[in-house]
Amino acid sequence: MPLRLDSRDPGFAARFAALVDARREADADVSRDVAAILKRVRAEGDAALADYTQRFDRHDLDSRGWSVEPADTRAALDGIPAALRDALELAAARIATYHEKQKPQDSDGVDGAGVRLGARWRAVDAAGLYVPGGRAAYPSSVLMNAIPAKVAGVERIAIVTPTPGGEINPMVLAAARIAGIEEIWRVGGAQAIAALAYGTARIRAVDVITGPGNAWVAEAKRQLYGVVGIDMVAGPSEIVVVADGRNDPEWTAADLLSQSEHDPTSQSILFTDDAAFADAVAAAVERQIPALSTAAVARASWDANGAIILVRALDEAMPLVDRLAPEHLELAVDDPEPLFAQVRHAGSVFLGRMTPEAVGDYVAGPNHVLPTGRRARFSSGLSVLDFMKRTSFLGLDAAAIGAIGPAAVALAQAEGLPAHAASVALRLR
């Protein structure tokens, strides 16, 4: 059964602290296994990829084919129902429009000392996108990762994806076609991350790797950070809903289950100031779970990681929400602005009763690749900036170095770096 807490209970502080500190990542220590995989791929390249694919995905890359041909993505797009194609195209258009507004502007100017200062933004040369297979085969994630890279101006975008039995979800291929991605490799797992980072004879190395994956993929990204850029080390999905008693409990229950059905380690939490509503939502969850095709996963997640927290007033909930720093936060009230103004840490916020988190997963526009595990305290969701880097520049003439150079000489001498001091002082004579 899910956790039930009441902020008026004497033991609330300790029990809530335990909820905040609970770790929901996979129990298995995968670090050593991942390190071995990375080392082998770096040493053996494609031979290691072929062996791991045969072992884990049960097919032979040499006979099945290492990559997906453009004709296959075109056929997949042509083969899906028109309504699904329209939905993907609507999502792609809205995601592109939202992310276009994130593109940073170059700067270039001269300050009061006559120094030219500025910054120039450029896209990385190549990006690798990890697209999960198996339980999590999500065409929406293809769009959410590929479109920001396209908007940023990345010239080469490569997808890697596990293909159990050699098969790929046609919706994933259709989404790749809509996003304009033609380089797709039938390789998944930590070994695919290694291939993107180090490069092999077939798969050229990239500069940035993004995209969700299982514990092995997340650990591979963590270990390879610095060899390549990564978006984030993502953990299990999570949602926090702050709702008063004027909500429909069936709606709120569905919102909570929208994350519970992702994975047994996902987390769904309700804050409310209405005890009767809390009971009604709990009952609605119990009614809805058996009807889900994902019932087993949702049940495991809700029972192990779900929580309903009763507070005196919704304002009391907001500091508690900040301590959780959730991936998704719904503010299901008539006027969410006063509560929204109090939010300091959240991956994405969904305002009002008519804004379910699930709409943000698909067609709203903002990115659904978001920080989990309280990482919203210090990081943000995937954006165009993850595929770009900034180069600063400056230019001085004789007058400018005369104005600021003596201070540089003084600081260099104070730091015990005489060559630094000389490189400036020689120009001051």
Image (spheres, rainbow, N blue to C red):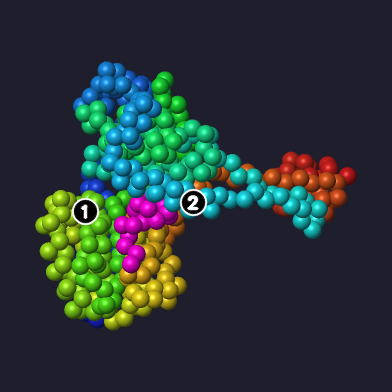
Q: Which amino acid does label 1 sit on?
A: Glu
- For image coordinates 64% across by 45% down, the residue present is 120
| Camera-side residue of 154 and 390 | 154
- Classify the position of the N terminus by image quarter: bottom left
Magenta-colored stretch includes residue 203:
no
At which x and y percent is residue 77? 34, 36
Sooner in the amino-acid sequence: mark 2 or mark 1:
2
Name the disc covering residue 129, or none. none
Binning the other alpha carbons within 10 Å of mark 2 as few (below 14), some (14 to 19) or many (20 upward) gives some
Q: Distance between the residues labelled 2 and 1?
A: 29 Å
Residue ID for mark 1: 261
Say whether residue 423 is left or right of residue 331.
right
Residue ID for mark 2: 97
Q: Quick check: can you spot residue 276?
A: yes
- For image coordinates 39% across by 73% down, the residue present is 336
Q: Main secondary structure of the magenta part?
A: loop
- For image coordinates 73% across by 43% down, the residue present is 420
Q: Which amino acid does label 2 sit on?
A: Thr
Q: For the magenta stretch, what is the residue range?
A: 354-370
| Camera-side residue of 428 and 394 | 394
Looking at the rendered structure, the secondary structure element under dot 2 is helix
Looking at the rendered structure, the secondary structure element under dot 1 is loop
At which x and y percent is residue 114? 81, 53
